[in-house]
Amino acid sequence: MKKKIKVLISACLLGDNVKYSGGNNLTPELVTLLEKYNVKIVKICPECFAGLPIPRVPSEILGDKVFSKDGRDITEEFLKGAEISYIIAKKNKIDFVILKERSPSCGSSYIYDGSFSGKVIQGQGFTARKLNEENIVIFSEENLKEIEKYLEKLNKQ
Ligand code: SF4
C-alpha cells in the first residue's frame, strides 16, 4: 500500500481554538485540500507547547527577541515551542509543514514588525526559522496552489 503523506500543521488553521485571542484561523480550503489527498495530519501549536495560556497577551518579534504587548521578554518560551515542534516533526518523519503566516511562531515569510501597530515586514517566526534551519519544506496557508503542486509531486513518488 502507498505510504500516506504526512504533514505538520499549525493547529489554529484546522479550527483549534489555540490562538492568542482564544479563537482560531480555520481555513476551509486547506482542510478540503488535505482531505482530497488523504493526508495524515500532525498538529502543532508552538505557543501552547511553550506553556503559554489561551487566551494570552499577543506578542511580536523585535530583533532576536519576542515581547508580549505588556512588555515581557518571552523569547525563551518561543525557543522552547520551536524546539518541541521540531522534535515532533522529526519523530513523525513528516513530508512538509504548513504554518500560519505572520505569527511570531509560525510565520514563514512575514511577521509583524514588533511595534504592535499592525505593520507587517518580511521575516520568520521562531518555529518557522527552526524548521527552515533543519531543511524542512514549509508552506503557509496563503499558498494553497503551491501546496497542491507539492502534494501532486509527493503522490507520484
Ligand atoms: Fe496558530 Fe502557531 Fe499561533 Fe499556535 S503558535 S496559535 S499554531 S499561529
Image (cartoon, grey):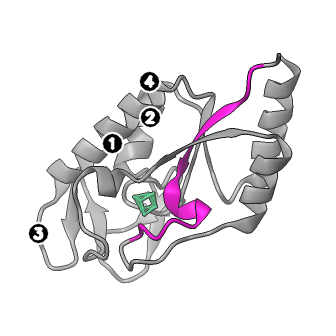
Residue 122 picture location, percent across and down: 48, 57
Element type where label 3 sits in the image: loop
Q: Earlier in the sequence, mark 3 or mark 2?
A: 3
Quadrant in which the C terminus appears: top right
Q: Earlier in the sequence, mark 4 or mark 1?
A: 1
The magenta-colored residue range is: 3-19
Residue receiving disc 4: 91
Element type where label 4 sits in the image: helix
Residue receiving disc 3: 72
CB atoms at circles 1 and 2 under 8 Å apart? Answer: yes
Q: Nearer the viewer, mark 2 or mark 4?
A: 4
Q: Indicate the quadrant of ligand 1 in the picture.
A: bottom left
Residue receiving disc 1: 82
The Cα atoms of the two marked residues, 4 and 1, are separated by 14 Å
Locate residue 156: give its quadrant.
top right
Residue receiving disc 2: 131
